[in-house]
């Protein structure tokens, strides 16, 4: 049984997490990073994350089943967006592997949805697989970063971006596993709490990377 204090903490974390989703995009605007495609896409990713979570304030906020379905849509959009960010930011030699991973995931999700429809079980398989692929690419990105001694400001920013996505999608993977093994279900308030804690910490990591290391392109500086 959930106590009033638990429910209050849940609601507080959720609202704070949604507010912080807008912070990376505001940093992109504040630091004039719109001319760097990767930074712009990271900002847009978090802006969409914040906007796509507004259903909690618009209507049916207590309908956990509806929230679970909308969370699936948000996660699906987010997974594709992260793949695009990785493709844009990666070196040419790594793009082929990323492209085939994204293509394979798109085919996988299409087959699952065509075969089983828009149900909770197929949704979990799709989000779980997409999250797992993102985790793998984040780990490879961080390992590649650690292998180098000197790093550019862009590489430092991307390291925090990899860590951010690794944290967020590890949480998504854990939620999928809990559901698949019937430890929990998609309408459990605890899952939403875990989800928004991950979103909050992930957005903070993105904010730190953008604030500390991201710089506007040199060609833009020369115009000032």
Image: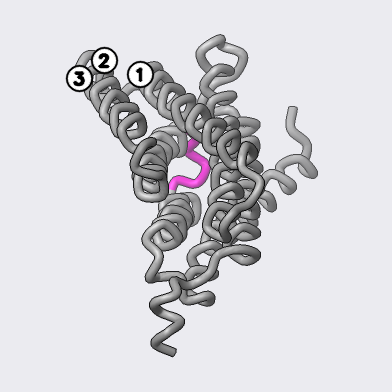
Q: Position of residue 110 (x, y in %)?
A: 23, 24
* Element assignment for label 1: helix
Q: Position of residue 100 (x, y in %)?
A: 29, 28
- Marks 2 & 1, CB-CB < 8 Å contact: yes
Q: Is residue 111 above or below residue 35?
A: above
**Residue marked by disc 2:** 116
| Mark 3 / mark 1, whichever is N-terminal | 3
**Residue marked by disc 1:** 122
Q: Which residue extends farthest top?
A: 181
- In depth, the one of 90 and 160 nearer the eye is 90
* Element assignment for label 3: helix
Q: Which residue extends farthest front?
A: 149
Q: Which residues are magenta?
A: 60-64
The residue drawn where x is 20% and y is 19% is 114
State the CA–CA distance, disc 3 to disc 2: 6 Å
Magenta stretch prevailing secondary structure = loop
State the CA–CA distance, disc 2 to disc 1: 6 Å
Q: Which residue extends farthest bottom?
A: 224
**Residue marked by disc 3:** 114
The residue drawn where x is 47% and y is 50% is 53
Q: Position of residue 62 (x, y in %)?
A: 52, 42
State the CA–CA distance, disc 3 to disc 1: 10 Å
Neighbourhood count class around disc 1 (C-alpha, 10 Å): few under 14, some 14–19, many 20 upward = some
């Amino acid at each position: 049984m959930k106590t009033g204090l638990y429910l209050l903490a849940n609601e507080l974390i959720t609202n704070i997490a949604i507010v912080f989703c807008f912070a990376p995009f505001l940093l992109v605007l504040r630091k004039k990073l719109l001319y760097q495609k990767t930074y712009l896409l990271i900002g847009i990713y978090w802006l969409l994350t914040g906007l796509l979570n507004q259903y909690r304030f618009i209507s049916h906020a207590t309908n956990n089943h509806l929230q679970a379905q909308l969370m699936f849509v948000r996660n699906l959009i987010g997974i594709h967006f992260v793949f695009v960010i990785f493709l844009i930011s990666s070196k040419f030699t790594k793009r082929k592997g990323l492209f085939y991973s994204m293509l394979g995931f798109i085919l996988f999700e299409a087959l699952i949805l065509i075969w089983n429809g828009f149900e909770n079980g197929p949704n979990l398989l799709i989000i779980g697989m997409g999250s797992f692929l993102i985790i793998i690419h984040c780990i490879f990105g961080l390992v590649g970063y650690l292998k180098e001694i000197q790093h550019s400001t862009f590489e430092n920013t991307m390291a925090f971006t990899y860590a951010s996505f690794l944290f967020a999608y590890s949480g998504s993977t854990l939620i999928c596993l809990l559901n698949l093994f019937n430890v929990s279900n998609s309408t459990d308030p605890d899952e939403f709490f875990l989800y928004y804690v991950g979103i909050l910490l992930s957005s903070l990591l993105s904010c730190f990377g953008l604030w500390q290391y991201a710089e506007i392109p040199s060609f833009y500086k020369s115009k000032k």
